[in-house]
Amino acid sequence: MIWFKTRLYLTSLFAIVMLACLFYLLHEDQSQSGQQRSEILLQLQVLDNALDLEVMLISSMQQQNYDEIVRLAQQLKQQETDPDMARLFLELPAELTEKLKQYRTTLHQRVALAERIKTLASTARNGLNYMPMLVDRVAETHSARLPKVEAIVNLLYQYHIFKSDLDALEIKHQLETLNDDSSESIADLKFHIQANLMAQTQLTQLLAEYKQIPNKTAFNQLYSAYLSYRNKEAQQTEYFNSVLIGLTTVLILLLTFLYLRLIRSHQQTEQVRLRLKDGVDNIREAFALFDAENRLILSNRNFCNYYPWISELLKPGTDKEIIQSAIDAKCRYLQGSNSDLRLVQQLDNGNYYLCSNSPTNEDGEVWVRVDITEARRGEQELRKLSRALEQSPAAVVITDTNGVIEYINPKAEQVSGYTLEEVIGKRPSVFSSGDISPVNYQDMWQQMLAGNAWQGTFLNRRKNGQLYWESATISAVRDLRGEITHFVAVKEDISERRSTEEQLRMNAAVFETTNEGIIITTPDARIISVNPAFTHITGYTAEEVIGKTPQIFQSGKQKENFYQEMWQTLEQDGSWSGEVWNKRRNGSVYPQWLSIAAVRNSDGQLEQYVAVFSDMTQRKNDEDKIRQQANFDALTSLPNRIMLKRELEQIQQLCDQSGESFALLFIDLDRFKAVNDTLGHSVGDEMLQQVSLRLASVIRDTDLLTRFGGDEFVIVLQKIADPEDAAQTAQRVIEVLKPPFQLAARSLYIGASVGISCYPNDASNGDSMLRNADMAMYLAKDRGRNQYQFFNAEMREHVRNKTDLEQALRLALERNEFELYYQPICNLKRRKVVAVEALIRWHQPDQGLIGPGEFIPLAEETGLIQPIGLWVLQRSCEQMQQWQKLGIDDLLISVNVSSNQRHLGFDAQVAENIISKAGADPRKLVFEITESMFLDSSDEGVTWLNQFKALGAQLAIDDFGTGYSSLSYLKQFPIDKLKIDRAFVRDLPDNKEDASLVSAIIAMSQSLNLELIAEGVETLEQLQYLHELNCANIQGFLLSKPVTAEQLPGVIERIESSFPALTSADYEI
Amino acid sequence: MQAFKQYNRAHKPRRQIIFSAVMSLLLLSSFASAMDLSSEPIKPIKPASELNQDKVSLGRDLFHDARLSSDNTISCASCHSLKHGGADTSAVSTGVGGALGSANTPTVYNSSLNFVQFWNGRAADLLEQVNGPIHNPVEMNSNWPLIVRNLSQDPGLQSRFSTLYSDGLNAGNIRDAIIEFERSLITLNAPFDRWLKGDESAISDAQKQGYRLFKSYGCISCHQGSNVGGNMYARFGAVKDISEYFSDRGTPMSETDLGRYTATSDALDRYLFKVPSLRLASRTSPYFHDGSVTRLEDAIKIMGRFQLGREIPDEHITAISAFIKSLTGEHPELSR
């Protein structure tokens, strides 16, 4: 509006100013050049007049210098030639130009005449000037003529005053009177007067000529012509002025009229516009209209509300592109529908506008924006809900009021096994398992139709027939009037949950009741939970440790990198187990067997660690005790025979490497049996202790003193240079034992016999050294007490006998001189003979029946153990088959396997060949191996054993307790049974040490889940004691000595029948 | 506008009356103290007005610049020797290639006061006059394009023109500068002028006597005004047949001798010459249009004979000659 008004005003003002300028210019131009021309003409006239004046003055001799007339002539000329002035007269009418030209011609003529007048006037003046001088000369020369001359000269001056021809005639006449006088001065006078008269006459003529030039007329004509021209011009100008004024008035009137018209029409337009704007403003949509030049014409209030940040731009005239880009800066476009024209804007504030840009008839554009935010949100909401429904972990079934299925969600499809298409239009009974569901459907429908939500558990049947538990909540959907339109059942397959809960309950029970401590931690090792066993073992209550890390249990006994390796293993394998020394709440340090497992969720994300541990204190103590007892003599604390043999092997190896020798002294006390028998075991034991002390005093630190058994001691002298060194030591031994022993308040005298064997001279290994030394000792004893004896040639002869034996042994296999005897193993709980141990016997043609102790060591030594072992296995398998035929089919057969056999190539493959050949069941075989097998704890050894397990056979450790292996160590091996060595059983139950040892073995075997067999049970007390200690199986003469295969069924029958009242039987080997 | 014109008409005469009255009063007052010389036919020379000294300096260099001639030998100053009274000491000047001119060189001093230029008045003013010698084959024998081309090769000159004239070096501006210089050649402070201004001792008694004789013999009729001549034509032999002069001269008649006739071909203009100024006459021997007379006294004598019809006695000639010497004013170029 303002712009419109301004434009109108400006246009009007401009028109008026233009008119004024035109008016002024016309007038000004006219008047200026007119004025200049007038001035020039006037100047011309002035110059013309001045020229007249000057010519008059000159011709009347009154002007003596011509500078002025020269100046005038030059000015006239300049006026004519000056280009500025000439220009003024260029555009005049031809008539006027002609008049000017005429006038100028008169001026030229006058200037030219003036020049001549100047010259003539000079001549005339010249004469007059000279007159006085001439008169003077006449006065000097012809004074008589002077009056006459003076009269003539006076006449001349008179003539010059009046210019009268009368005077001229008179002068001429008077001059003639002077003709008679021929004097020079008179002649001169005459000449000059005549010349003067002539000049004056000519001058007068020229002057007349000059005056005749019609310059005045020409000027008047010019000037009047010019005036009339000027008047005409002025009239014209005035006429123009009037016209202009008229025009201006008309224009102003017109403008006023137009202005009023425009104001009115503008008001009307404005009213229409306001109405339109009001209308447009009050529609809900945003609206903007652009003209063909893309300028904004109109936008409504909502357009500003829709895009508040462009409110500044929403002025009519703003370019469309500017508005568009300002809007685009804060929104993005989504394809609304398939139509290209309708886009959806998404604003940064989250609003959605549907955009429609349509062309108008005048090539402009109209924009309409519809706020569809709510609808969009609704859609979004619906989409979200339907998405939720689709992804819901709960099965959803929607039915109409009649119970006809309209929709089931994917979870429901998955749970039921039916697809949506399959169940649409059917009733939910398709999911039913029949009559076995615990739901009262009648009650359910009543509840639902009453509009109540119903909750319950269905036992449904999947499409594949599988039953499943489903917990369901069914609620009614009502329309706006409150009428029920649909039922929605939200169901959950709780089968798994049910079983999981059961599992959890079970796990909780285990957690609560197990004897093993359990710690559960977060991934960063914060304790979450511990079980009662934990508190029992560590002394810490759950409250004390939850939130802390297991570091509080650390004893400081573990090596630095121990935990690092532990975590590394945990990370790599997901579990770790091992022995750890930890600290209890009371500060005591104890060993525990700790197994840690990382628990990961289904995504593989670490969720927690579970640590299970058992208190190994008891076991550890037991192991230590076992090792001690196994390797050392309890009485003297000296290494025992077992350790000796092991040490010998090592010493032998060292000597082999260094090329040195060593000697073995076998010491047997003389008369000790008498001491024992007469003074009792306690005194004997005390004596043995003192003996051991005395013996220790005579040897070097590097030497080894062992109690070989009973009253036998063995000393190993390392690095002897000469056998004599051994002899000296032997002598010292004899000497040190000679003094009396103060025991039982008396002095007791004993002696010692010493046998010496040297390595490598006398024997090739430890066993043969012992044998040789033993042999030498017997010889020494035979030669009288307190003697020592080197092994010698005679003894070598005895060895040769052994070679004979070896030969016989080889033949024995060929001659089939071996036979297997079987000793029953009885399970005390089941009161049943569960197994037999196969034991070999040799029917030597010369010596009769020989026990294994006499030939097995030799067989081991010579390698004959391999064929013998194979024979034993073969025979056992065959026998198993034979017994089976007799109906004895639940009997296990134990077969001994020595470590040498393994080295000689015996393995599961070999065994399997034999077993399958015999057609025996490998599961009924037990391979008895010795602890020495585990000296080699390599993977190879474990694999070797595992292969036997793989056959299905069982593995038992024979003579357990004599080795030094720890029980925890055994856990790595696939062991099923332990056989407690007869040495530990022999003195039961009287020997307390043995008793505690056996009970420890029993406890541990139980914790390791190993079956236990006690060997060498000979008395009922032993049996009962073992029974009390929960040792399940026993073997020994109490039940039966080894018997032949034919005897066995009878023996078994006897044992089992006599079980309730087992009495000692005959004990013979 | 009409009113304004009427105002002018009405007031101009009145202003003149007032002016005349004041002047009369002034004159009356001066009568009391000194002689009244205000109506003497000779007036003191007024200095040139509104001179641009830079243009004068440029004009002076051009005046002395031989590049204005076709063979770079002749400058304006070659003939108008400024220290020799602005004229040539020879009867006629030598132009390019040794060509001889046809008329005696008039002085360049005070030439701007002449009512026309050349002996025969064929140039209305200096502007027309400059073209004469430039093109004259026996003078510079050149033309403006050639001169402009030659001078344009002088960068110093070009820059001087550029600073003085918006359109730089061209023929019109060369002429303008030369004329500006010529306008500066006004001789001032002549003893006679000083006498006219009231310095009674400025001229000697002999000179005063000469002046009186100069008037009495009628010389004053033609040699009047501030330039003592130069403002009218006069017939050579005004009162006596000039053929006697030519026959006495001993050289044949030339076209130049015909005077203004050569310019107008009007029989009345035969032997009509511009009356030369006598301001430098004492220093511009030889005399007359043909330079045939070397002594001033002889010239006065010949003038008396042919122009005045008198045989002027020698003692009068001497006095007149002394008077003529008092007309010579001062100019720096003159005394260089």
Image (cartoon, helix red, strand yellow):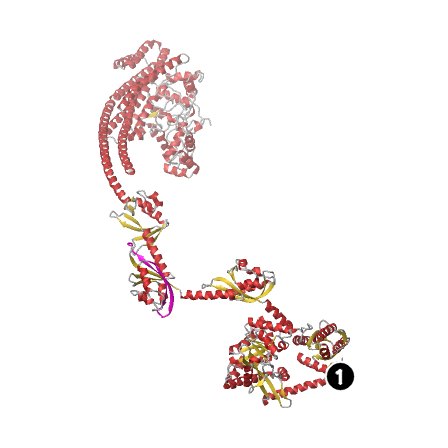
Any part of residue A567 in sight: no
Give the quadrant of residue A81. Answer: top left
The subunit letter for the residue under badge 1 reads: A
Q: Is residue A696 left or right of residue B255?
A: right
Name which residue type carries label 1.
Answer: Arg
- Quarter of the image where the C terminus of chain A is located: bottom right
Secondary structure mostly seen in the magenta stretch: strand
Q: What stretch is highlighted in magenta?
A: A452-481
Count every numbered label the image shows and give the total: 1
Closer to the camera, A68 or A852?
A852
Closer to the camera, A942 or A203?
A942
According to the picture, the residue beneath numbered tag 1 turns out to be: A783
Q: Which residue is the extreme one toward the front?
A: A1061
Q: Does the magenta stretch include residue A480?
A: yes
Q: Is residue A490 left or right of residue A93?
A: right
Closer to the camera, A523 or A1060?
A1060
Residue A311: x %, y % from top left: 34, 43
Q: Is residue A704 magenta?
A: no
Residue A410: x %, y % from top left: 35, 63
Residue A676 vs B15, above or below: the answer is below
Give the quadrant of residue A774. Answer: bottom right
Dot 1 falls on a residue whose secondary structure is loop
- Quarter of the image where the N terminus of chain A is located: top left
Residue A991: x %, y % from top left: 65, 74
Residue A263 vs A774, above or below: the answer is above
Residue A519 vs B165, above or below: the answer is below
Give the quadrant of residue A827. Answer: bottom right
Any part of residue A1064 in sight: yes
Badge 1 crowding class, 10 Å Cα cut-off, few under 14, some 14 to 19, many 20 or more, is few
Closer to the camera, A138 or B328?
B328
